[in-house]
Image: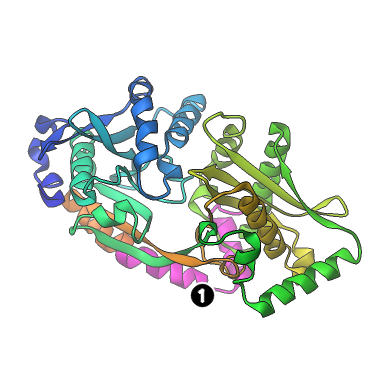
Amino acid sequence: MSIAGAISGSRDRRARGAQAASRGLRASVVQTGAALEVLAHRWLELETRSSGLGLFQSLGWVKAVFAFEAARGNRDFDPVIAVAEDDRRLVAVLPLERIRTGRRSLLVPLGHAFAQVSDVLIDADTDAGEAVSRLLHAALAASPADGVSLLKVRDGSALARGMPRTCIQTGEAQGAPYVALDAYVDFASYFSSIRAKTRKNMRNARNRLERSGPATLRRLDRPEDQRALIARTLEGRADRLSEQGLTSRAFREGGFADFCTSLVGRDDIDIRAFVLLHNDQPLAEQWGFVHGDRYYAYVASRDFSHSEESPGRLQLSDIIRACAEEGLKGCDLGVPAMPYKLTFATQTVVVRDYALPATPRGWVMFRVWDVLLRPAIKRLVLALPTRLRSRLMRLAGHGH
């Protein structure tokens, strides 16, 4: 059955229930913490058999979102985790939640404001198109909505391969730089693949910096140190966005800082926190996660008074070295494809936003707002002078 059939005919959607089965593939929905615990062991097994990266579809990430929403007493939290089984074997998981935005209800990735990637966790031997169709069918049957919004879907991912033909691409494509460390025998061989002129410029920048004191990368492992670094990077990033008259989904979400600090100390989330120190003072800081033998950069900030020495670039070089020495497969630097990231990237993955209308209202809203108006307004705002844009953001309540 195609997704067109799954998301049409809303009149009898509730009668069909939350299960869809064909060709031996059966899909259902998990919506409570207790049901999630029952599924936990098989979910972890699926992570070892799945293709792709999968941090934001991992059991640890999903449980962290559940715990955070419970801790802040969010009564509007409406999880819709679609799972697919082949006989008794779990073969796919699509973690979603239902939200209301404006005059429409949407299914979006679980923890949508905090995740950097939309994807599906799927067994490498399972057909992506069939599985995604079943998962979306089950999710919409259990939790009717005007549509499904899937932001930051990477070309070549399981979700991109399984995306129904009825999907609508919204917004402009972006790029996510990635460093494939497993393509090289060691860091030295990887680093030698970077342009000679770039390596020379970095060496000169480090030498200039170290004339006034040593610059060293330190990894912070104590929970209290990680919390302090996270707070500094979030404050620094928020200040920088405000100066530029910009905002982001995460920083518009009032609980972003609390969510980030709630991840510290969890045994199912592996945080990496790095600080580049110059004369024992933070020059650049970054933190992220390790999952599936890959590092996911998450939030970074730096001291802009030393911009000539490119501290963000120097720190990222040291972080990649640390990841290589740890034996990690690669470093996912995430969107956007900023120049300092591209310096190190071995590839840049195209990232797209998709929408799947499920009702006439959903189709109109996606076509009018997501495809036409929102991108046009964004281009108009970005064309404004930075100072004016910053003032407008503050008036709109997105700045400090």
- In magenta segment, residue 233: no
Residue 77 in sight here: no
Classify residue 218 as left or right of residue 268.
right
The answer to which of 44 and 360 lies nearer the viewer is 44
Outermost residue to the right:
212
Q: Is residue 87 left or right of residue 318?
A: left
**Residue 29 shows in this picture:** yes
* Residue 97: quarter of image: top left
Does the magenta stretch mainly form a helix, a strand or a loop?
Answer: helix
Query: Which amino acid type corresponds to the residue marked 1 in the rendered image?
Result: Ala
Q: Quadrant of residue 309?
A: bottom right
Residue 393 in percent (x, y) is at 56, 59
Where in the figure is residue 6, as x and y percent of width and height? 13, 45
Question: What are the residue bounds of the magenta stretch?
Answer: 371-400
- What residue sits 63% from the left and 69% below the top? 387
Residue located at (84% from left, 66% from top): 209
Residue 392 falls within the magenta-colored stretch: yes
The residue depicted at 70 percent of the width and 37 percent of the height is: 221
Above/below status of 44 relative to 358: above
Which residue carries the number 1 mark? 383
Q: Position of residue 343 (x, y in %)?
A: 60, 70
